[in-house]
Image: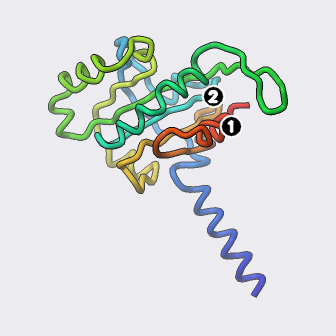
Amino acid sequence: MKKIILITLVAAFSKLNAQHGLGKMFPTITGETFTEKNVVLPAACKGKPTIIGICFTKSAEADLQTWLNPAYNEFVVKRDTTNSFGVAVSYDINYYFIPMLNLVNQVLEKGSKEKIKSKTDKEFWPHLLFYTGGLKEYKKTFEIDTPEQPYFFVLDENGEIVHVEKGAYSPKKLSAMEEFLE
């Protein structure tokens, strides 16, 4: 009986770790920042930890926006903070938000991009990546079970996914991401 319980726990833990691409290399995504710079992920991020936020639907975009200020202030604004051990921490990471448009929005690409850009502070423009292309392969790769929520991927220096969060911002989720950057 103990052996069955142990096998079940190991299988459940393995499945949990495999979800949303954990342990896999982040797939290639090509896009353009709102400052008109072409970016190919994860190649552009090699050598630094990276946080990538992705949303697949309009409803997920609202939750993605809840992350903009807190994550930007914590990870991008170059400031020293103190972690729970009293040690000064300063992050040197790559940071991107990607609203991935569906086919309907791709037809209206120019208008969609300009609409998003006009509603976004200029300081975020280098971190917003405008992507148009297929969504199915990314939903499959990331095992997206709730496309109505944004997903946040923490990549190591090599582009491997080491942590995933989803949904609206919370301090607890931000802290969980920080643990993989320290």
Tell me, for residue 49, which label it has, or none. 2
* Left or right: residue 44 compared with residue 54: right
Against 23, is 129 above or below? above
Point 35% across, 19% down: residue: 120
Specify the label residue 84 is tagged with. Answer: none
**Residue 95: x and y, percent?**
53, 25
The image quadrant where one finds the C terminus is: top right
Kind of element beneath mark 2? loop
Q: Secondary structure at mark 1?
A: loop
Q: Residue at x 43, y 21 (%)?
A: 39
Left or right relative to 104: residue 12? right
Q: Which residue is mark 1?
A: 180
Query: Residue 161: where, in percent of width, then height?
Result: 58, 41
Q: Quadrant of residue 155?
A: top right
Residue 4 pos. (x, y %): 71, 83
Coordinates of residue 180 in the picture (x, y in percent): 68, 37
Label 2 and label 1: CA atoms lie apart by 9 Å
- Looking at the image, which residue sits at the far front? 171
Q: Mark 2 and mark 1 in contact? Answer it, CB < 8 Å.
A: yes
Q: Identify which amino acid the numbered label 2 is placed on.
A: Pro
Q: Is residue 179 left or right of residue 22?
A: right
Mark 1: amino acid = Phe
Dot 2 or dot 1: first in sequence order is: 2
* The image quarter in which residue 119 lies: top left
Up/down of 26 relative to 80, above or below = below
Q: Quadrant of residue 74?
A: top right
